[in-house]
Amino acid sequence: MVQCADCGLIYLEWVPAYGELYDDLAWTHQHKREEQRRLEQSPILARIDMMTRWRLGLFGDATPAGGLTSWAKPGPVLDVGCSSGKAFEALPAGYIPHGIEIDQTAAAKARVLFEARGGRIVNADGVSGLEQFPAECFSGVSLWSYLEHEARPREALEGVRRVVRPDGIVLVKVPNFDCWNRSVLGAKWPGFRHPDHVQYFTPPTLARLADATGFDVRFRLYGRIPVNDNMYAILRPRH
């Protein structure tokens, strides 16, 4: 892990090739391995975390579908790194789900869900997938647990800036490298997931990246507090 001398972003100096991500390193595979690793390493804490996931909804709209319903206008919406599409199942009528997913099997499952509602799936990495959509076509974009996996985060946000409507919004959820839990747990912090987590954001570095790619950023009420392992932000295109 290294830190950029100019912007302060912490990242992996050597990252997996995208070709590997399509198969063995896809999030759908790594997520299962990570849960098993936590159960073996810290069985009590891991089970408590899994049993209390309801806490994430205490402040409302703590899901991609909930956030887009609250903040984005009805119309086409996009989930970058959509996995099997379950995160968009709760979208109400009027929101047309689209997705980008690097794992072929997960993309096939999402395609069934999204095409039934008039949407589209692109089986590609985030940057390449964004290039396949027209400009200013989405009222909302979800980058939920995605940017920490992206080797080219600036190019990804530039692509999102191109496809989101001028009055649209972008939801971002990423691990918070500045959280107290990382200081306490050290190498056992759940935000460390090698080799698929390749970017490690703090509130200032996430805000700096958003600003550099043409967005105004607002962190949610609970979105950058140090007791939270994650950050939650809403980006709006700057005019």
Image: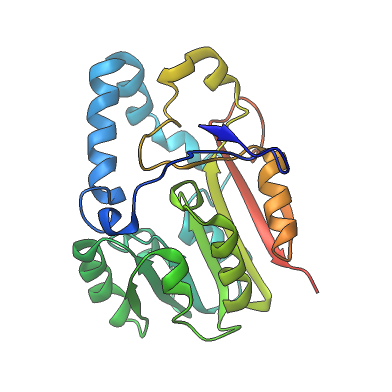
Residue 211 or residue 233, whichever sits in front: 211
Which residue: 67% across, 60% down?
Answer: 235
Where is residue 187 drawn, in percent x and y? 44, 19
Image spot of residue 136 (x, y percent): 61, 83
Q: Is residue 26 depicted above or below 187 in this figure?
A: below
Q: What colouring does the structure picture have? A: rainbow
| 223 or 184: nearer the viewer | 184
Q: Is residue 135 visible?
A: yes
Give coordinates of residue 134: x percent, y percent: 52, 86
Name the residue: 65% across, 39% down: 4
Q: Position of residue 126 (x, y in %)?
A: 43, 65
Q: Which residue: 26% across, 61% down?
A: 103
Q: Is any part of residue 92 visible from this angle?
A: no
Give the answer, above or below, for where 187 lies relative to 212.
Answer: above
Q: Is residue 99 left or right of residue 179?
A: left
Q: Which residue is drawn at 44% across and 81% down?
A: 132
Q: Quadrant of residue 188?
A: top left
